[in-house]
Image (cartoon, rainbow, N blue to C red):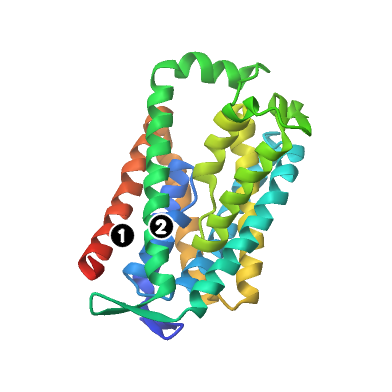
Amino acid sequence: MLIDISGVEANVAYLFLLGCVAGLLSGFFGIGGGALITPILQIIFQIPFHICVGSSLAQTVGSSFTAVLRHWQMGNVDLKLALMILGGNFLGVEAGARILDYLNDLGTMVIRNQETTYVEYYSRWLFLCVLLLVAILIMAESFRNQGNLQTEEDRRNLSNSTYNGFLQRFHIPPLAEFPTSCVSSISIFAVSYPAFLIGVTTGLLGIGGGVITIPLLIYGYGATTRKAVGTGLLLVFSSTLYGTVTHAIRHNVDLQLVAILLIGSTICAQFGAIATQAISGRSIRFYFSFIVLGVAGLLLYDLSSRFL
């Protein structure tokens, strides 16, 4: 069965399968599928990039809602820290959406006898850079935790001991403290500016940002692991919700596409969560980095075959 999505015919079964894969990965790795869904929708299904971004954000809102509620009930959310970050994050989402508008308005260009739009060409290069960065961050975190998982991480999870994040070294006033996350002192500027940059990737590329936000909370801000996961999921939900509204106003959200992806992702996320019991936690993110690299390779192949 085929449906029309912004002038492009797409197979419902294949879209449902993509939603299933995204849900399985989300449940298994604890990371939203926006970084994978958006480029696949663009490259394989040839859906216009602005529709990919808006619809991917809407899908992430639906799939992350139950996870946020669960962590809220468990007391793993630092609301004060989340509100501080969301200020810069929302501004970044709006800035990213405006950059996308600008690229859309530029129209088309010709590269090596291939006609393409500015937004599709530059968005793919940006996505390639972001995916490579994400894969490197995940691998670095996995190797870092390989030897000290049973000491440093478990101790931080079970106690109120603090971890000196690298952003705590910038003692630029005004300073703030977040006792719930065991962050004794950190510059508000050090909190806001990274949040702004992550928001730009959300508004421009449709990435929820969890894969960057959670390591940033732990190693940048110095939050404990459990609070970082819960707070990070709240940030992903809030920023993608704001991004969905922003893109819906611009008519960048296709409800048919969102519904199909959500049905597949919500079903298979449960199987992914069950599968995590079979593999050690320190290996999960490491495996996910290879999936991210695979999508990056798909992007690089598409760019090289068409434009290089």
Eyeballing the image, is 259 above or below 205?
below
In the image shown, does 74 or 61 lie closer to the viewer? 61
What kind of element bears circle 1?
helix
Q: How many C-alpha atoms fall within 10 Å of the one at disc 2: few (<14), some, or many (≥20)? A: many
Dot 1 or dot 2: first in sequence order is: 2
| Mark seen at residue 127 | 2
Residue 33 shows in the view = yes
The vertical placement of 305 against 68, above or below, is below
Whole-number angstrom distance, CA of label 1 to CA of label 2: 8 Å
In the rendered image, the residue lying farthest to the top is: 151
Residue 116 percent coordinates (x, y): 34, 77
- Residue at horizontal 60%, vertical 35%? 217
Residue tagged 1: 299
Q: Is residue 39 above or below residue 150?
A: below
Tell me which residue sits at (75%, 40%) in the image. Answer: 79
Q: Give the mark count.
A: 2
Question: Is residue 137 left or right of 197 when viewed as pictured?
Answer: left
Q: Amino acid at mark 2?
A: Phe
Identified by mark 1, the residue type is Leu
Task: Name the one closer to the observer, 99 or 139.
Answer: 99
The N terminus appears in which quarter of the rendering? bottom left
Report the residue at 49% width, 72% height from top.
103
Residue placed at 42% from the left, 33% from the top?
277
Report the side of 178 relative to 59 (left or right).
right
**Residue 33 position in % (x across, y down):** 46, 54
* Circle 2 SS class: helix
Q: Quadrant of residue 288?
A: top left
Q: Do callouts 1 and 2 mark residues in contact (Cβ within 8 Å)?
A: yes
Quadrant of the frame with the C terminus: bottom left
| Residue 274 placement: quadrant | top left
- Dot 1 surroundings within 10 Å: few (below 14), some, or many (20 or more)? many
